[in-house]
Structure formats: C-alpha cells, structure tokens
Image (tube, grey):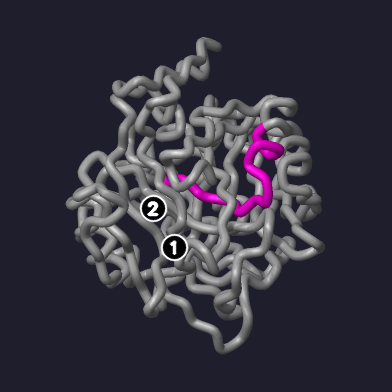
Amino acid sequence: MKRVSSWRWLILAIGMAASAVACTITPGLSVGLDVDYYGGKFHVSPAAHVGITGRP
Amino acid sequence: MKSSWGLVMLAVVAMTGCQRGPQFPPLGEPGVSRHGAVVWRDLVTPDPAAAMEFYGELFGWTFEPLGDTGYVLALLDGQPVAGILDAQRTGRPVRSALWLQAISVPDVRDAARAVVKAGGTIHYKPSMLAGRGRVAVVEDAEGALFQLVTSSSGDPAVREPAQNNWLWAELLAGDTERAATFYQAVFGYEVVAGGEGDPSYRTLRAGDEAQAAILANPFEDTRSAWIPFVRVDDVAATLARCEAKGGRVVVAPDPARRRGSLALVLDPSGAPLAVQTWNPETTGGR
C-alpha cells in the first residue's frame, strides 16, 4: 500500500476543518458594513466599526 | 464524519511516522522558547495560484513548492514566512480561504487536552511533522480555528517585525470574556482587560510581551476568527495593489482608527487579513 506521509494528512485535516468552518466566515456586518463576498455585492460604510484595532 | 477521519489519520500517521516526505523548514532557533507566541501561519485556500500572485504582489513574497505535496512555502527575502495549503486536495469544497496561525506550546498533547477541557474541538490530533515538530489543528470554544505547535527546532527569537512580515493577531470573538477564559486556560496567558477605548477588549500576554488581542466580533452569523496582521510601509499603496490583484478592501484606513494606519482586506479567495503601518518608537512598541 502506498504510504502517505503525516503532513499530507495534516493538509487534508486542515482543509476539512476549513470546509466546515471557513464557509461561514463570509462577513455580514450589522453596524454599517455589508459584505457579501460570494454574491459580489460589496458595500462598506466609512463609519463602520469593524472590530480591529491593530498592534499597539 | 470528523471522528472517522480522525481514526483514519491516526492510523496512517501511526503506520508512516514522519520519516518520509519533504521536510518542513525549521520554525525557529535552538534554545528559544516563546510559548504563547504565534510562530507560524498557513493559508488554506482553494486557489493557491491566485494566492501566490496576490501575496507576491502585495508583500513581495516569493514561493517554493514543498515537493509535489500541494504545500507551498512563502518566502520573504529568502526566509520562510508562511505556508499555503491547497484546499482542493481535500476533495471537499472550501468556498472561502482562511489563515491558520500556529501558537507555540510546551507540549501539544497537553495543550490539546486543555483545548477540549475548555470547550474546544480537535480537528487534527497531535502528530509529528518532519522538520516542524508536533502539531495539532484545533477549534476554540466559539469556532475559531488555529494550530498548536511544539517546534522541534525552537521558536523564532523576538525581533522587530520586518516590513511585509507578520506583525500582530486579533481574534474576533462573539464573547470576548469567554474567549479570554478559553485562551487563558489553554495557554496560560495573562489577560489584560480593557484598552483601546473598548471595555470588551482583551490583551493576551505571555513572556512579558503582548501576543494578541481579543475584540468583539462585529459580524453577524459568523464564527469567531483570527485575523493576522502584516506590517507594511504604505497602507494606501498596499491597498491599491490588493485591489489590482483581486483582493477586496473591507475597511479602508480611517484617521480615527489608529491614525489611519490599518486596513482590513480579503484576499482573492476570501481570507481576511489586516495590514498596518507600525512604528515601535511612536506607537509604544509592544
């Protein structure tokens, strides 16, 4: 049987996890930021609070 | 499904060990331990070619495939800074890419147990990867994915982040207090509450150094997610290249937000990341 190295399974596992989780990351923001990545719509309110602050 | 795959993976890992296949490059330097620090990042994407074109243009990274594995190393000035994983190899649809960061721990198996005890999930059980060390992929109590790693080569030493290299990380969490409790339990972080004018803001500190921050997730109907930051010398120019290469600027620089020094973007496959200009002498450093 062909051997498969452990890193390949890591890739598979990460991909599976991503397939389960990443598809829910599409942003849909309630505070002025409306992003529909898949639908191609894209609107950002300049005043939107986006929840990132950056490194102090 | 997940448990059956876990059994398969365990069986294969047990059969093959890590003696075959390409070696990952060393993560750090012998004798250096920075437990709690983010020491590596992997991009999981359904379109590695687009990712390479995008990140090459954005940050000047170059790329080196790791054999025919579907795993590509991203290099900055010839030094590995990240990995790119071809999600298509999973045989499953991955509609949106994401960055997975790896946090250093003294013992991945102990940390994985702590993840479960704190309400998280293990996606890839602790396993040895040639050249890298012991690794696991886990999910926190609110769904944010990340990796645990005990490097076999030591951790990267503390250095000022170079331009176009990693700068920072922020977790967008549905419940910042709950998330802070989780990460404190798993990594032993010192959690500093408040700051940045936001009572829900939490700073995670380890080794007398701020490692990351937790903020309230502003996205509805989404899980928590880690957002990696890259240091750039010109945000506006970076964003122009981002859009030219198929990325999207989700949040443009705002003078009210750290003097307009940061922006949030999505790469061509939807992976969120932030870019920031950062001067340790004028911003207070770490």
Q: Is residue B90 above or below residue B177?
A: above
Give x and y (percent) for residue B32: 54, 84
Please give the residue where the numbered disc 1 appears in the rendered image: B148
Specify the quadrant of the image occupied by residue B48. top right
Please give the residue where the numbered disc 2 appears in the rendered image: B138
Task: Confirm whether circles 1 and 2 share one chain.
Answer: yes
* Amino acid residing under circle 2: Val
Q: Is residue A33 above or below residue B168?
A: above
Q: Residues within 10 Å of mark 2 (few under 14, many from 20)?
A: many
Can residue B232 be seen?
A: yes
Q: Is residue B236 on the magenta stretch?
A: yes
**Which secondary structure, mark 2?**
strand
Q: Is residue B67 on the magenta stretch?
A: no
Q: Identify the residue at image location x=77%, y=43%.
A: B56
Q: Is residue A54 left or right of residue B189?
A: right
- What's drawn in magenta, residue-wise? B226-239
The chain letter for the residue carrying disc 2 is B
Q: Identify the residue at image location x=24%, y=52%.
A: B179
* Amino acid residing under circle 1: Leu
Q: Nearer the viewer, residue B216 or B155?
A: B216
Give x and y (percent) for residue B199: 19, 50
Q: Nearer the viewer, residue A52 or B258?
A: B258
The chain letter for the residue carrying disc 1 is B
Marks 1 & 2, CB-CB < 8 Å contact: yes
Q: Looking at the figure, which quarter contains the C terminus of chain B? A: bottom left
Specify the quadrant of the image occupied by residue B182. bottom left
Question: Residue B251 has which mark?
Answer: none
